[in-house]
Image (cartoon, coloured by chain):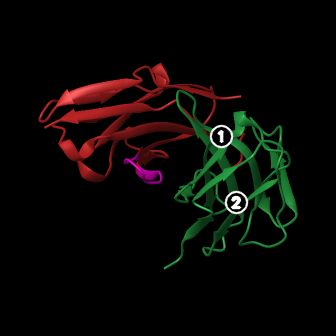
Chain colours: A green, B red
């Protein structure tokens, strides 16, 4: 079955370190997204991509970057991890059409100490 | 830019009670509306969605939602909740000027007491 997977599922890192969260989907979806989930804020969009070589900033993009070298993967990089980036991160993907359902990965729990 | 408000942050109900979770959005154009559910320790799953047509949408597990355009609302309802409905519920909006991005509300945590 097609799916979307994230790794690592849990990570503890130190302030100032670079961290990369992987996201891989096998649906061949062009659209991919990264959200962070924080209590009281729901899910907030970090970055998104509508296709290979396309990346865009979302609502809370500061301190994060993404790259899209192929259809299947959208890795999220924290350039210099900060305690404020302790959160649960969800990757998602969807087909092209406006309003199509977005499918979420199982989440990556990141703690920055 | 669109925004989504969920007014109830925490709801506690007893089994068999009726549920209504509020969701309001701010955007005057065409929208698609979604409710997602997140069970403890799991990822978000789609409960139901509204694209067009009948404003009363039925989803999985007995949930339904009504789109009231004049009120910019998309409230989620269930006549009789079960303990297994304990979860966090998110309303989301996809506006036609926002590509395929979703804007989420802050979520409502529902606890159903057995």
Q: Is residue A103 a member of the stretch shown in magenta?
A: no
Q: Quadrant of the N terminus of chain B?
A: top right
Q: Secondary structure at mark 2?
A: strand
Work out how far the residue at label 2 is from the one at label 1, CA to CA, in angstroms. Answer: 25 Å
User: Position of B81 compared to B48: left or right?
Assistant: left
- Residue A69 x %, y %: 85, 70
Q: Residue furthest bottom?
A: A1
- Residue appearing at x 65%, y 29% in the figure: B2
The answer to whether any part of residue B100 appears in the image is no
- Residue B31 x %, y %: 58, 38
Magenta region, main secondary structure? loop
Which residue is at the front of the view, A8 or B102? A8
User: Position of A49 compared to A9: left or right?
Assistant: right
- The quadrant where residue A19 appears: bottom right
- Residue B66 x %, y %: 36, 34
Which of disc 1 and disc 2 is earlier in sequence?
A: 2
Q: Is residue B41 a member of the stretch shown in magenta?
A: yes
Question: Marks 2 and 1: which is nearer the front?
Answer: 1
Labels 2 and 1 in the same subunit: yes
Tag 1 residue = A86
- The magenta region covers B38-46
Q: Quadrant of the C terminus of chain B?
A: top left
Q: Secondary structure at mark 1?
A: loop
Tag 2 residue = A31
Chain letter for mark 1 = A
- Residue appearing at x 37%, y 48% in the figure: B39
- The quadrant where residue A3 appears: bottom right
The answer to whether any part of residue A47 appears in the image is yes
User: How many other residues sit within 10 Å of disc 1, few (<14), some (14-19) or many (≥20)?
Assistant: some
- Residue appearing at x 61%, y 76% in the figure: A26
User: Position of B52 compared to A5: left or right?
Assistant: left
């Amino acid at each position: 079955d097609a799916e979307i997977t994230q790794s690592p599922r849990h990570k503890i890192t130190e302030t100032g370190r670079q961290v990369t969260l992987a996201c891989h989907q096998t649906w061949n979806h062009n659209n991919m997204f990264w959200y962070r989930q924080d209590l009281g804020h729901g899910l907030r969009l970090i970055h998104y991509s509508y296709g290979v070589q396309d990346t865009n900033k979302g609502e809370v993009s500061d301190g994060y970057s993404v790259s899209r070298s192929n259809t299947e993967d959208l890795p999220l990089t924290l350039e210099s991890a900060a305690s404020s980036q302790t959160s649960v991160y969800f990757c998602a993907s969807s087909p092209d059409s406006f309003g199509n359902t977005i499918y979420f990965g199982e989440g990556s729990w990141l703690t920055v100490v | 830019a669109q925004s989504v408000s969920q007014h109830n942050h925490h709801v506690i109900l007893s089994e068999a009670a009726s549920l209504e979770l509020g969701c309001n959005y701010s955007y005057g154009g065409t929208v698609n509306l979604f409710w997602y559910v997140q069970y403890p320790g799991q990822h978000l799953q789609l409960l139901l969605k509204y694209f067009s047509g009948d404003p009363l949408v039925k989803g999985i597990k007995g949930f339904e939602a009504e789109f009231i355009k004049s009120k910019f609302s998309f409230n989620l309802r269930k006549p009789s909740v079960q303990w297994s409905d304990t979860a966090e519920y998110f309303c989301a909006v996809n506006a036609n000027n926002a590509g395929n991005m979703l804007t989420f509300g802050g979520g409502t945590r529902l606890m159903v007491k057995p």
